Each structure stands twice: as structure tokens, then as C-alpha cells.
Image (cartoon, rainbow, N blue to C red):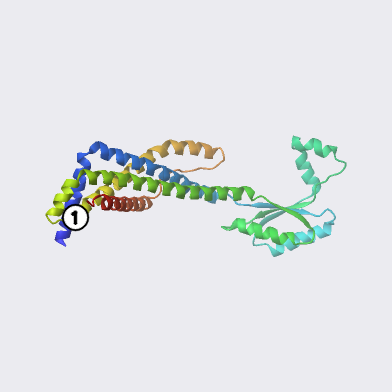
């Protein structure tokens, strides 16, 4: 066990020495990887910060039930009682709007006033405006309630304004998919960068590797420092990427918050949790170490 620890300590020191003896090359590679990692971190931060805002939006709080024009007053009252009694758990408030009230409201809008005045009679129907009770599954509840109300006698049409919510959810899903594609692309860039770096180091140290093998060094002993070079480079790149993302997020957060305030909401743009960043950093170190092992295995065989 002590021998194994000493070998890893030696490999770690050799890896640090190789990075320090070539500062410009090492810094260039670390910076390239960090810039590549910075993009998905910022995108991740935006998605994580946007989810609470989307969750706080009142989803489909109202629906309008348009009644058939031939309904009489007593039939309207019966329909109202049926809706309130059968769906009291889903409904917070139900308001009856007569066609005259609806016409009066529309006439206040200049875009509709002239058109309504030109008509010989009021074409608007009576309607119920239903405010749904708050629920985590409000969108699904609204859709189900609309389907049930459509089957009632006397109901003509139901207007449920959920299209924009569906578009918003689709946009978030697209953002998640784009983040996944971007992350995979960044992983490919990181692997290619580390692979090429280790390839050059292995080719430059061919004589040292050959001498080490002549004196009995195992393949694990020869390759281990290269693995540490990859892992250390990946870890330093992650730290630099997080720092760059933190710097970039500051002006983005201010601009995004000004935009959100114009919609009477607030967005707090911040980096993901430290635990998540630590997990991603460890994952990147494993990936870079694996890329280094792949490269040194291919280019140290001579």
C-alpha cells in the first residue's frame, strides 16, 4: 500500500513538473478548455434561474365558457349550479358575463367600437368566466375541466389560453436539449485538446519512456504521470471556467433583471449549486484523465 501511494505521489509530482516546465503551453491548453467549459456553465445557470420564474407563473388561471344563444335565463342558472356543484374543488370563482356586458367592455376598445356599432345586433354570447383554484397541476386540471365542460348541454365553446404556456414549456425543453448538445460538443473539444496535448508530450519524451522500460518500469508506471497531467489540467480548467462564468454572469444578471422587471417579475441569475459544480468538475477530471490514458496508450507504443 505504501509503495502504491509513493508511486502515485511520484506521478503527481512529475505531472506538476511537466506542467510548470512548459507554462505557456500548459496555460494555453487550460484556457482553451476553460473557455469551452464556460459556455455550458453559463447556459446551465440561465436554465436553472429561469425554472423558478416559470414555475411561479399562474398557469391557465382563467377560462371562458361561451353559452349557446338560445339558452334562457333559468337554463343558464341551472348550468351555473351544475358547474359549481360538480367542479367546486377545481373552481375558485365563477362569474356570469351577459352579452350586453361583454359588448360594453369591447366598445371601450377603439379597435372594436366602430365594428360593434356597425352591426345591427349584438353578436356576442353570454359566458362564464371561471377562475381556477391554485394547484401544482393547474394546466392539466384546466385542460381536463375544459373537456368535461364541453360535454354539457348549453355550452357552445370554451376558450383556454394555454398556447403561450405550451410554447414556453417547449422553449425550455429546447433549451435543455440545446444545453445537452452543447455539453456533448464541449466534451468532444476537451477530449480532443487533452488527447493532442498528451500525444505531443509522449512523442517528446520517447527517449525517457524507452529508458524507463529498459530499467524495468511497468506500463502503468510510465503512463501514470500522463493521466495526472490530464486530470490536473481538467481540474484547473474547471476552476478557471467557473471563475470566467462568474465574471460573465454579473453583467448578464443585471441586464436580465431589468428585462424581468418590465414584466413585473424578478430573475436571480446565479451559478448552479456548489455540489453540482463539484460533481461536474470531478466528471471533467475523469474525462480528461481517460482521454490522456487513451492518447498515451496509442502514442507510447514504440
> In the image, is 171 to the left or to the right of 19?
right
> In the image, is 169 to the left or to the right of 28?
right
Instruction: Indicate the position of residue 218 as horizontal and vertical percent values.
Output: 18, 57
> In the image, is 126 to the left or to the right of 16?
right
Given residues 132 and 226, the one toward you in this image is 226
Given residues 128 and 36, the one toward you in this image is 36
Position above or below: 156 against 38: below
Instruction: Indicate the position of residue 99 as horizontal and vertical percent values.
Output: 80, 48
Instruction: Indicate the position of residue 188 as horizontal and vertical percent values.
Output: 38, 48
Circle 1: is it few (<14), some (14-19), or many (20+) Cα within 10 Å? some
Query: In the picture, residue 151 is in which quadrant?
Result: bottom right
Question: Which residue of the protein is positioned furthest toward the left in this rendering?
Answer: 215
Instruction: Indicate the position of residue 293 as horizontal and vertical percent values.
Output: 28, 53
> In the image, is 200 to the left or to the right of 103?
left
| Quadrant into which the N terminus falls | bottom left
Q: Secondary structure at mark 1?
A: helix
Q: Number of marks in the image?
A: 1
Question: Which residue of the protein is positioned furthest toward the bottom in this rendering?
Answer: 86
Question: Which residue of the protein is positioned furthest toward the right in this rendering?
Answer: 120
Given residues 279 and 35, the one toward you in this image is 35
Given residues 42 and 274, the one toward you in this image is 42
Residue found at x 31% / y 47%:
195
Position above or below: 279 against 120: below
Judging by the rendered image, the residue that carries numbered circle 1 is: 221
Residue found at x 38% / y 42%:
36
Amino acid at each position: 500500500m505504501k509503495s502504491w501511494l509513493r508511486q502515485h505521489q511520484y506521478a503527481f509530482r512529475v505531472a506538476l513538473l511537466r506542467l510548470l516546465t512548459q507554462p505557456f503551453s500548459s496555460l494555453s491548453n487550460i484556457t482553451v478548455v476553460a473557455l469551452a467549459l464556460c459556455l455550458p456553465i453559463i447556459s446551465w445557470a440561465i436554465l436553472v434561474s429561469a425554472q423558478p420564474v416559470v414555475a411561479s407563473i399562474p398557469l391557465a388561471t382563467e377560462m371562458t365558457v361561451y353559452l349557446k344563444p338560445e339558452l334562457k335565463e333559468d337554463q343558464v342558472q341551472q348550468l351555473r349550479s351544475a358547474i359549481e356543484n360538480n367542479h367546486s374543488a377545481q373552481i375558485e370563482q365563477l362569474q356570469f358575463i351577459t352579452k350586453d356586458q361583454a359588448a360594453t367592455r369591447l366598445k371601450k376598445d377603439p379597435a372594436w367600437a366602430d365594428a360593434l356599432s356597425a352591426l345591427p345586433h349584438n353578436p356576442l354570447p353570454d359566458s362564464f368566466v371561471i377562475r381556477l383554484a391554485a394547484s401544482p397541476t393547474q394546466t392539466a386540471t384546466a385542460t381536463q375541466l375544459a373537456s368535461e365542460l364541453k360535454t354539457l348541454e348549453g355550452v357552445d365553446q370554451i376558450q383556454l389560453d394555454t398556447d403561450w404556456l405550451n410554447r414556453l414549456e417547449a422553449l425550455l425543453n429546447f433549451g435543455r436539449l440545446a444545453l445537452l448538445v452543447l455539453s456533448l460538443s464541449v466534451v468532444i473539444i476537451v477530449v480532443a485538446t487533452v488527447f493532442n496535448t498528451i500525444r505531443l508530450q509522449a512523442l517528446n519524451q520517447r527517449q525517457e519512456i524507452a529508458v524507463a522500460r529498459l530499467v524495468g518500469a511497468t506500463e502503468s508506471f510510465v503512463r501514470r504521470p500522463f493521466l495526472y497531467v490530464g486530470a490536473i489540467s481538467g481540474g484547473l480548467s474547471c476552476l478557471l471556467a467557473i471563475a470566467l462564468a462568474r465574471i460573465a454572469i454579473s453583467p448578464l444578471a443585471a441586464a436580465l433583471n431589468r428585462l424581468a422587471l418590465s414584466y413585473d417579475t424578478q430573475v436571480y441569475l446565479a451559478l448552479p449549486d456548489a455540489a453540482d459544480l463539484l460533481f461536474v468538475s470531478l466528471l471533467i477530471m475523469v474525462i480528461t484523465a481517460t482521454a490522456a490514458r487513451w492518447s498515451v496508450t496509442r502514442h507510447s507504443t514504440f
